Amino acid sequence: MRIDIITVQPGLLESPFSHSILKRAQTKGLLEVHTHNLRDYSMLKHNQVDDYQFGGGAGMVMMLEPVVNAIESLQAKVKYDEVIYLTPDGETLNQRIANQLSLKGNLLLLCGHYKGIDERIRIHFVTKEISIGDYVLSGGELAAAVLVDAIGRLIPGVLNDETSALLDSFQDNLLAPPVYTRPEEFRGWRVPDVLLSGDHKKIDNWRHDQALERTKERRPDLL
């Protein structure tokens, strides 16, 4: 999979993709992540990419031409399955969306900044709009990092144990059950006996019951 990201702050994306699972995915050749500085596509003095909004009002708007130049330049080299704009008023990211996007070949992400982007970009170029929650960030870079992480870990071969992702919270509309590791007892706090029984059917049933109970308690809306 290849993911290209258009941003005015490429430095914000250096660390998330240089460590842990996403670094491993790139090292294995399973994922390519490329960041592109929007200012490189500006034809204006000082590489300007924002301007005042028509009609007045506070906040600057990302200009039409630099963004269009960036998108069309990249589209000339790569055929994208989706052009995704990270924005607070997009569809809220969930596991279903991450699963769907992980099956794509090439994605182009556009990070908003300032007051947002010229609406004509959304109308004529963007194919999908995604939010990571009902709050506003300074820009779309952190949202892009979250999206890439959620997608990247689902690519076959990225995780050492491929069944791990299938047992994550939300994969079956349930939260994940409690997990334990050694020691078996600490300060009188014991691991549930069923997990030490070696009976995999009982363990699976216990985990399902615990996941169901936890979901009822914490996220009944998922049921």
Image: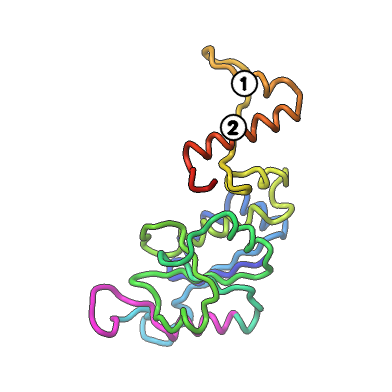
- For mark 2, what is the residue? 210
Q: How packed is label 2: few (under 14 Cα within 10 Å), some, or many (20 or more)?
A: some
Q: Which residue is mark 1?
A: 192
Q: Quadrant of the N terminus?
A: bottom right
Q: Residues under labels 2 and 1: Cα distance? A: 12 Å
Colour scheme employed for the rendering of this structure: rainbow
Q: Residue at x 64, y 35 (%)?
A: 208
Rendered position, 154 above or below 65? above
Q: Amino acid at mark 1?
A: Pro
Q: Crowdedness of circle 1 by 10 Å Cα count: few (<14), some, many (20+)? A: few
What kind of element bears circle 2?
Answer: helix
Is 67 one of the magenta-colored residues? yes
Of the residues shown, which amino acid type is indicated by label 2?
Gln
> What secondary structure is found at the residue carrying circle 1?
loop
Task: Identify which residue, 73 or 165, lies in the foreground.
Answer: 165
| x and y percentages locating residue 127 in the rendered image | 55, 76
Give whichever of 165, 59 is nearer the camera.
165
Q: Residue reaching furthest front?
A: 223
Quadrant housing residue 98: bottom right
In the image, what residue occupies the spot 36% across and 85% down? 45
Q: Position of residue 202 (x, y in %)?
A: 72, 27
- Residue 171: image x %, image y %? 62, 49
**Viewer-side label of 2, 1:** 2
Q: Looking at the rendering, which quadrant does residue 59 occupy?
A: bottom left
- Is residue 170 visible to the viewer in this orientation of the structure? yes
Q: What range is drawn magenta here?
A: 52-74
Q: Is residue 47 visible?
A: no
Q: Which residue lies at the image location 55% right of the left edge and 16% below the top edge?
A: 186
Above or below 90: residue 77: below
The one nearer the camera, 146 or 223, is 223
